[in-house]
Image (tube, rainbow, N blue to C red):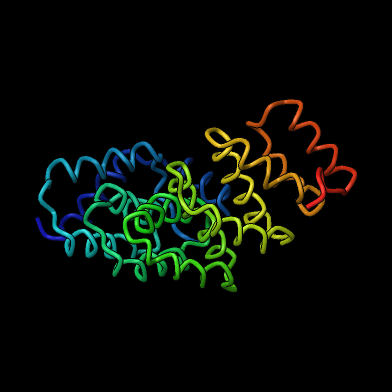
Amino acid sequence: MDVPDLVAFIESELRTVATPERAAGEKKYLKSDLDFLGATVPAIRKVAKGVRRRHPDLDHDTVMELAAALWQPPIHELRMSAVEVLCLHLPLLTAADLPAVESMIRQSRTWALVDVLAATVVGDLITRFPGLNKQLDRWATDEDFWIRRSALLAHLKPLREGGDFERFSRYADAMLEEKEFFIRKAIGWVLRDMSRTRPQLVADWVAPRTHRMSGVTIREAIKKLPPEQAAAFLEAYRQKRPAITP
């Protein structure tokens, strides 16, 4: 089965399980200009896994061509399928694929597509190809806040395995006083995730910055910290002072 046939198969499978009511609800919820079929995320993942099961020998070029072909129509579920295809074939991706992924992120305009591309696809790429972090340095100052968010979220999974906290810290510190909700949330999200395994590192980072944090950032960041410590940080935030002097 060639790529156009695979795209047609995926779309047909998704239309079979889609509902107009869900399509209308998702479009409204995501405030998206894309068209919606009305298929659920589990259904999209099931279809993508079915394609991989039936075609286990897809090579790198075919995977990238399939992802690009699924991305082309302005249909949300097909674009989500493109993301799932990449996620299911991560070991095939190379450093040279980052520009294609960046282009997808720029066109996404919604967390529902951006977050998986950033955290899973880009996160895997920078883990296997550390030289790509130089590209993230550029992303961290990009005019597009979705690209800046992606620079943060790309560290989510690598940091679980002891990744480059210094680089994330530098990005987060520079963005800490941004007004954009999706930036504020991303910083807190990564810190919250890190605090599960390295709570002291997170606490040491948060403490001198409580007066600079937004409410959404600090509340996310301290969720998994010891209750007394979290309460102290939140009180310092409310008083607009650092919990400790830097």
Describe residue 188's horizontal placement relative to residue 111 as left or right.
right
Against 186, residue 197 (above or below) is above
For this orientation, the residue located farthest to the front is 246
Nearer to me, 8 or 80:
80
- Residue 173 location, quadrant: bottom right
- Can I make out residue 126 in this image? yes
Residue 192 relative to residue 120: left or right: right
Question: What residue lies at 48% left-to-right and 41% top-to-bottom?
Answer: 21
| Up/down of 42 relative to 116, above or below | above
How far across and how far down the image is residue 114, in percent? 47, 56
Q: Is residue 74 above or below residue 46?
A: below
Spot occupied by residue 132 in the image (x, y as percentages of width and height)? 39, 66
- Residue in the image at 90% along x and 44% along y: 239
Question: Which quadrant would the N terminus be assigned to in this image?
Answer: bottom left
Question: Which residue lies at the image location 40% right of the left edge and 63% below the top edge?
Answer: 74
In percent of width and height, residue 69 lies at 26, 64
Q: Nearer the viewer, residue 57 or 35?
A: 57
Which quadrant of the structure image shows residue 96?
bottom left
Q: Position of residue 94 (x, y in %)?
A: 26, 63
